[in-house]
Amino acid sequence: MSKIYNKYIELKSSPNYKNNTLYLFKSGIFFIFIDNDAKIIANLLNLKLSNLTDSVLKCGFPCNSLQKYMNLLKNTPYRIEIISNDASTKQVLDINQYNYGEKIQCIINEIINLDIDSLSISEAYAYLHNIQEKFQTLYSTYLKYK
């Protein structure tokens, strides 16, 4: 079986598992639901089911559509947890935690890609002020969901 399916089985059999929890796996540039979760979501969102393996179904959508689908699932009885698949570990996140991490990563990428040699002193000050405002906004959002 696939690593995703093994993680799915592990999560579903965990003592902390709640019946209304569905797991959304990040797989490359897609998010996918598998097995019974895929059947539920495909029915709710009219997504096409396909095979992950010969015996396991999946359905999904591109990563850039995450917010659209999460908005559609807001008023359902299901709790969606995102399984983030980074190189070192698979981490279970709710949608707010996932979005928070993505926004922080965008700010970090902006800082990394900044050409500091091309900034004047006033531009550097304005840039630092802008970054500070972005982090303050993110942090206040984080505190709401903590």
Image (cartoon, rainbow, N blue to C red):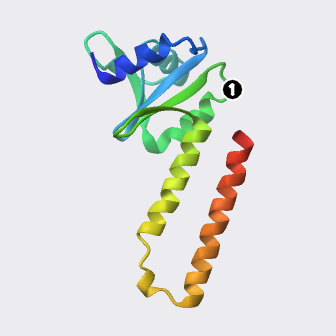
Residue 107 drawn at (x, y percent): 52, 61
Pick the quarter of the image with the C terminus. top right
Tell me what residue is drawn at x 64 percent, y 74 percent: 129
Up-down relation of residue 86 to residue 134 (above or below) = above
Count of marks overlaid on the render: 1
Q: Secondary structure at mark 1?
A: loop
Say which quarter of the image contains residue 85. Answer: top left
Pick the quarter of the image with the N terminus. top left
- Of residue 33 and residue 87, the one placed in the foreground of this image is 87
Asked whether the viewer can see residue 49, the reply is no
Up-down relation of residue 104 to residue 29 (above or below) = below
Q: Is residue 57 left or right of residue 123?
A: left
Up-down relation of residue 1 to residue 130 (above or below) = above
Up-down relation of residue 25 to residue 39 (above or below) = below
Tell me what residue is drawn at x 69 percent, y 58 percent: 137
Say which quarter of the image contains residue 78. Answer: top right
Residue labelled with disc 1? 75
Tell me what residue is drawn at x 67 percent, y 53 percent: 139
Residue 79 drawn at (x, y percent): 61, 23
Tell me what residue is drawn at x 57 percent, y 77 percent: 127
- Of residue 64 and residue 79, the one placed in the foreground of this image is 79
Residue 130 drawn at (x, y percent): 62, 72
Q: Amino acid at mark 1?
A: Asn
- Of residue 32 and residue 138, the one placed in the foreground of this image is 138
Residue 45 drawn at (x, y percent): 53, 25
